[in-house]
Amino acid sequence: MILMRSPDAAPMVATLLALLIAIASGGLALAADILPCAQFTHEGPPQPIARGDRRGLERLELINQAVNNTPYSVLFFGDSLTEGWDPVLWERSLAPRGVLNAGISGDFTNHILWRLDHGNLAGPPPKAVVLLIGTNDLAAHRSPELTADGIRANLVLLRERLPESRILLLGLLPREQFPDAPLRWAVAQVNRLIRDCADGEHIVYAEIGDPLLDSDGQLSVAVSPDWLHFSERGYALLAARLEPVLDRVPRCRQLLLPAQMSCATRWGRSLLIFSSLQGAHLAVVNPRTTNEPGLCAR
């Protein structure tokens, strides 16, 4: 009441109210930032696009049936590089881990954005999602920034739809024969952007393409006959790199205890509070400033 009689009361009251709201919200503004990376362009959020070809629609329906009929541990979203994974190697290394091949040849980032809302997530929530998409965007002359925005849009949707699932974001794989080729450069640019979208807790970033290259950084025809898609040897190299990363991803969330998660929420998304399994110590980590990728990503 005393404040209201003062000529400066209105701005003072407004300031106090804003401060009280900020304290009560416990970092609500930070919690609204579902990803640590901002949009990479100013062209507006990427829009979902449906596939218009028969084969793409048939493949979409097969994936929808699979997720509804079988509870998969991991959904692996991608394009032809995922759909065309060597079937023998898939059955040997990925199928036993409960991974569904949810790749559709020819997909852009916009196509996955569309199918995530049209049946591909209709089944039981998986423990983890693998996302490898974007090379077709670059081939269609989209800039690295626009391509990264398309990947980011998929990450946002996945985090919203599957808040308890972990996401393994894979960097784009090398393409073209020589290291100074235009699309090879564009791939590297995209990877430099999207790696900042990982927080080490909900989203883990990994690049698994280095073993595909020889000592001169070239992509050989023995590994990639057309310098884009991979041979059995190429997929064997990828599988050897992917398997240990994939094995760590689904169980990581078990290390963040519920009490700690609520505490992290109370203080805002920029603080992650971890403890050992024995509860012997606590460590406070800010993933936006630390070089550590997070407890589970080590």
Image (cartoon, helix red, strand yellow):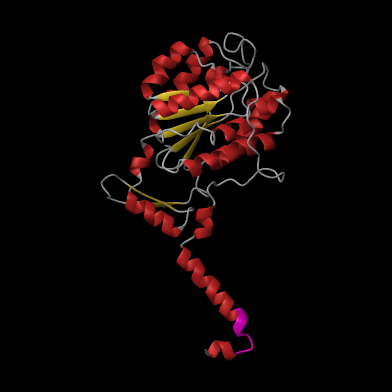
Tell which of 183 and 213 is nearer to you. 183
Name the residue at 44% across, 59% down: 267
Question: How far from the left and from the top, in percent, is residue 199?
Answer: 49, 43
The answer to whether one can see residue 205 in this image is yes
Q: Which quarter of the rendered picture does the C terminus lie within?
A: top left
- Magenta stretch bounds: 6-11
Q: Is 7 contained in the magenta span? A: yes
Please determine whether, in this image, residue 75 is positioned above or below residue 217. below
- The outermost residue toward the left is 278
The residue at the point 53 percent across, 14 percent down is: 234
Determine if the magenta segment contains residue 36.
no
Residue 25: x, y in percent? 47, 64
Question: Which of the two residues, 25 or 206, is positioned nearer the viewer here?
Answer: 25
> Is residue 197 shown left or right of residue 252?
right
Q: Is residue 13 above or below residue 87?
A: below
Instruction: Choose top left, top right, bottom left or bottom right for residue 296.
Output: top left
Name the residue located 42 percent from the left edge and 38 percent from the top edge: 165
Depicted 277 relative to depicted 63: above or below: below
Please tell me which residue lies in front, 152 or 225: 152
Residue drawn at x 31%, y 51% is: 281
